[in-house]
Image (cartoon, rainbow, N blue to C red):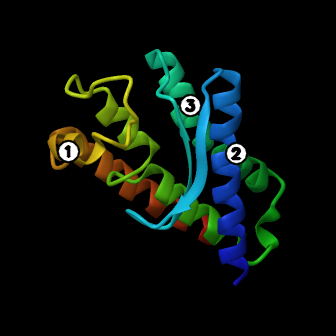
Amino acid sequence: MQAFIFFFILMFLHELGHVIAAKYLDLPIKKIGFQFEPYPHFFVATSWPRTNREKYIYLFAGMFITFCLFLFSLSFNFYSLPGLYIAFVAQIALETNPFYSDITIAIVSGNKKIKHGKSYGMDYKKTFLDYQFSKYWYLHFTLWTISIILLIKLNFLQ
């Protein structure tokens, strides 16, 4: 139960990172909410960033918050709290997965077929099919799997 609570707190803080980035970039926030597809998660919908630099700042802000909290928690040994490490592993696994994450949105949105100015979610499913099972997707999947294994092993080393 504790891991579940920590996980939702981490999800909230991840999205807060997107809100902070959107405010920093002067991107109008259209909606903040919760949805069930492709898996249950909070989300922040904004106008599409104007430049690639802004896109990457916005998309990776949530992940940056999670990784900073993870390193902070690791440094100060907060993993004596039951469930916190499990929540971090689950959150990092979701945030970096090759199926639907800020990383895949960043990769897929770099595809020339996407018409910028639209919400990145509108063309995502169609454009993702070009990415899925490509050599880059397999590389992403392999690195993702290795990182999860290393995170799990790291917990056993403590």
Residue at the spot 48% in from the left edge and 59% down from the top edge: 93
Q: At label 1, which amino acid type do we have?
A: Lys
Could you classify mark 2 by the number of other residues whose Cα lies within 10 Å: few (under 14), some (14-19), or many (20 or more)? some
Which element type, helix, strand or loop, lies under badge 1?
A: helix
Looking at the rendered structure, which numbered label has been put on residue 37? none
Q: Position of residue 22 (x, y in %)?
A: 64, 30
In the displayed structure, 21 sits above or below 158; it is: above
Whether residues under marks 3 and 1 lie with C-beta atoms below 8 angstroms apart, the answer is no
Could you classify mark 1 by the number of other residues whose Cα lies within 10 Å: few (under 14), some (14-19), or many (20 or more)? few
Looking at the rendered structure, which numbered label has been put on residue 58? 3
Query: Circle 2 sits on which residue?
Result: 16
Q: For this rendering, which residue is in front, 26 or 41?
A: 26
Query: Circle 1 sits on which residue?
Result: 126
In the picture, measured across the screen, residue 76 lies left or right of residue 116, that is: right
Specify the quadrant that holds the N terminus. bottom right
Q: Is residue 66 visible?
A: no
In the picture, measured across the screen, residue 133 lies left or right of residue 149, that is: left
Residue at the spot 19% in from the left edge and 27% down from the top edge: 113
Which element type, helix, strand or loop, lies under badge 3?
A: helix
Q: Is residue 146 visible?
A: yes
Q: At label 3, which amino acid type do we have?
A: Tyr
For residue 4, which quarter of the picture?
Answer: bottom right
Q: Position of residue 143 (x, y in %)?
A: 36, 48
- How far is disc 1 from disc 2 in space, using C-alphas? 28 Å
Residue at the spot 60% in from the left edge and 71% down from the top edge: 156
- How far is disc 2 from disc 3 in space, using C-alphas? 11 Å
Q: At label 2, which amino acid type do we have?
A: Leu
- How far is disc 3 from disc 1 in space, using C-alphas? 22 Å
Specify the quadrant that holds the C terminus. bottom right
Q: Position of residue 64 (x, y in %)?
A: 63, 39
Instruction: Tell me which numbered mark, 1 or 2, is placed earlier along the sequence.
Output: 2
